[in-house]
Amino acid sequence: MSIIMEISTDQDITKVKALKKMKRNALLLLGIAVLLFVVAIYFKIPMLQAFSEAAMVGGIADWFAVVALFRHPLGIPIWHTAIIPTKKNEIGENLGNFVSEEFLNREKLEIKLDEFNFAAKASDWLSQQENADKIANVVAINIIPGVLRTIKDEDVKRFIQVQFAAKLEGINFGDWVALALEPLQKGNVKDQLLTNLLTVMSEELTNNKDLIRKKVKASTPFLSFGLADKSITEGVFNGLQDFLNEAKNPGSAVRIKIDEYVYNFLEKVKNSEEMRVKINNMILSFVGKKEVQDYINGIWDEIKLSISNDLNKGEDSSIKNSIAGLIQSFGNGIKEDSHMIDKINNFIKNDLLSVLLNNKKVIGDLISSTVKSWDGKEVSEKLELEIGKDLQYIRINGTLVGGLIGLVIYAVEWTYHYFIV
C-alpha cells in the first residue's frame, strides 16, 4: 500500500520515489520466488521447490511485519498491527522517558561537553568570514526587514514623541540658561560680547542704508516729491549710528545704561525662580509647536528609509557588513581569550546543564505530550517516509535468507534419507 500524504518539499518527493523503488524491488524478488516455485512444481525440481517455498514464506512474513508497523496489512484489522498509529501515545511516553533518563544524564553530558569544547568551536566558527556573512545575511535580509514591516510607524512616532517630551520635561532649562549666562557677569566677557554685538549692528546698519531709504520713502507723503525722503533717511541713519557708536564706548551713558539692563537681567535669571520657570516654559512651548513635532516624526521616516536603502545595496550594505564585522570580531576575541572560553564552557557545563537536568522530567513530558498531540496516521506516514526505504531490505533479506534456509533444510533432509534411512 502506497503512502498517502501531502508532499511539501523536493526532498520529500525524492524520499517517496526511493521508497516506492525499494518496495518494487522487494515485491519483484518475491514474485521471482513465486515463479521459481511454479517452475519447480511443473518440472519436479525438489531443491528449487524447497528454496522457493522458504523464500516465499520469508518474504511474505517480513512484508507482513514491516507493513504491520505502519498500517493494517491489506486493510484487515488484525490484532497487534498498525502498531505506530495505535500505540502512538505509549511510544511518546516511552520516548520521553528514554530521553529524560538516558540522554539527560549529568556524567555522560559533562564528558561530552568537555570533549566538544563548545566555546572554542563556536568562536572558531564565528571568526570565519563565510559564517559571519551567513549570519549577517539572515539578519539583514530577514530579521531587520521583518521588524520594520511588523512595527507600526504611528506607534514608533508616538513613542519617540512621548520619550522626547518626557526627557525635555525632566530638564530645567531655566537653570541651564542661568548657568550658561553666569560667566558673562565675570571679567570682561560681557563687555567684549556687547561691544562685538554693537559693532555688528553698526556694520549692518551701514550695509542696509538703501533699504532704510526705501522704507522711509514708502512712508512719506506723495506730494513731498521725495524732498523729505533724503533728510529723514539721513536723520534716522545718523541718529542710529550715533547711538551705536556711543554705546560701543564702555564709558558712555548709553553703554552704562545697557550694562545695567544686562546685569539686572542676568541677576534676575540667576536668582528669580519665576524667571527660570518662564524660560523653561517658553522652550517647552516651542518644542510643542507643530513644526517641531513634524520634524521629530520625520526622524523615524528618515531612519527607516536610510535602513531600507542601505539593505537594498546587497553585498555593499554597510549595515550587513558592519554586522558581519562585529560577529567576526566577537569570534576572534573569544578565540584569543582562553579565560573567556573557560568561563563560557563552565557556564554551559554548570549553569545551563543544571537547568537542563533540573527540568529533564519537564522535557520528557514535553516530548511525550508533543507525540501524543500528533495525528496517528500522519505520524505513521512520516515515519515510513523516513525509514521505510531501509525496512524494505528486511523484506529482501527475508526472501533470500528464507530461500537459503529452505535449501539447508532440504540438504539435511536429503542427507538423512540418503545416508541414514
Image (tube, rainbow, N blue to C red):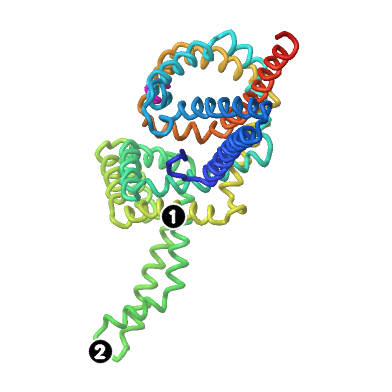
Residue 313 on image: x %, y %: 57, 56
415 vs 303, left or right, is right
User: Is 370 contained in the magenta span?
Assistant: yes
Quadrant where the C terminus is found in the figure = top right
Q: What residue range appears in magenta?
A: 367-371
Q: Residue furthest front?
A: 421
Q: Is residue 387 above or below residue 20?
A: above
Asked whether 145 or 384 is in front, the reply is: 384
**Main SS type for the magenta part?**
helix
Residue type at the position of mark 2: Phe
Residue type at the position of mark 1: Glu
325 vs 360, left or right, is right
336 vs 240, left or right, is right
Secondary element at tag 2: helix
The residue at which mark 1 appears reads as: 302
Asked whether 6 or 314 is in front, the reply is: 6
